[in-house]
Amino acid sequence: MHKIMDGFYEFQILSAAVRFDLFSLLQRPLTRDQIRAELGIAEQPARILLLGCVSLGLIHKRGEYYQSSDAAAMTLSRDSPWDQRSLVRFSHEIAYRAMWWFYESLHENSNVGLREIAGAAPTLYGRLAANPETERTFHEMMVTVSKLVAKRFVDSVDFSAGGRLVDIGGGGATNAIALARRWPGLEIEILDLPSVIVPTNRAIRDAGLEHRIHTIGADCFLADFPDSEHVLFAHFLEIWSPEQIQLLLTKAYRALPIGGHIYLINLIQQDDETGPRTAAIISAYFLTLASGVGMARTWKEYEGWLSAAGFEPLARKSLTPTHGLIVGQRQ
């Protein structure tokens, strides 16, 4: 029980260490005096920070020397290919203060925590464009999350026949780039908000794939989807209400030919509604901050919405312990 009660302290220890980039520094053993000299902080703050990190298992202390644990070195170091520091920055800069309003959001059935983000738009996504630093933090987090899932996704599907795929809400181009590299016959269009498309185009150019990946700057709820053989919703549908999800799936149905395929990648709640823990956390985030209407849904909910839109659900596959892929075919 106290582990849960003290969680906000533990996160701030982690966040402070990431802001100092402590785990990149401690790829090699250093003494406390060496660490505080590198960080530019006094002895007592250094003792407090190191005590916290050691007690949480993020750092090991052997004699007078400190060094990152294997887990911290793998996930919280700038030199690691699995670097997830952007998730910590997102939680600290965007989600942490907003989640103070969780009770009020439950009571009002609205994203009351959005008051922590400047602007007038009714969702976090609408306010990001007016807050460039916040938007950058958010999209760095999304790129990190997408990278963790994208490789498993592209290896789980067969696009050897090529065709045209529309990636709805695919800003950042992580999935599009992975798909284009894995399946050379695939042409991809990303439809996302105009403010998101600017850095998306930059990522596509940096990958040298501008001849195969194109972008459309538009609101997916207002714009028609271009005709295609495949439609992808990745890390997107869980943001919205059941009515909005049904609308988006219906629009995808209209854009696909008979036999065309739809791919849904989402944070999935188990069908018996008992977990996983990440589904509970992300659901609280969607309600309190992101949209006020979203949550992690069950496999069977998505399959029901697909069927109602005219698709036949073909397969469900776990990509990670928390991310699931559902494939459907237009009838």
Image (cartoon, rainbow, N blue to C red):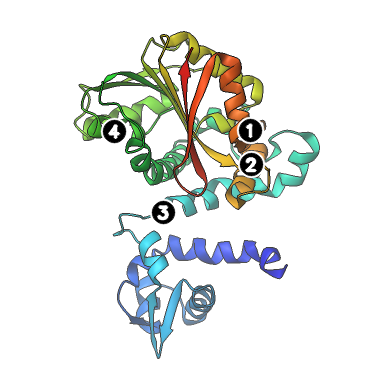
Comes first in the chain, label 1 or label 4: 4
Q: CA distance from mark 3 to mark 1?
A: 24 Å
Mark 1 vs 4: CB contact within 8 A: no
How many residues crowd mark 2 within 10 Å: few (<14), some (14–19), many (20+)? many
Secondary structure beneath disc 1? loop
Q: Earlier in the sequence, mark 3 or mark 1?
A: 3
Residue 1: give x, y in percent of width and height: 73, 67
Number of other residues with Cα within 10 Å of mark 1, as a class: few under 14, some 14 to 19, many 20 or more: many
Which residue position is annotated with label 4? 177
Amino acid type at mark 2: Ser
* Labels 4 and 3 touching (C-beta < 8 A): no
Badge 3 vs badge 1, beta-carbon distance below 8 Å: no
Query: Which mark's residue is nearer the viewer, 2 or 3?
Result: 2
**Would residue 190 appear left or right of 88 to someone viewing this image?**
left
Label 4 vs 3, first from the N-terminus: 3
Residue at image x 46%, y 19%? 329
Q: Which residue is mark 1?
A: 294
Q: Which residue is mark 3?
A: 84
Position of residue 124 in the picture relative to residue 136 (left or right): right
Depth check: 28 or 164 in front? 164
Q: Earlier in the sequence, mark 1 or mark 2?
A: 2
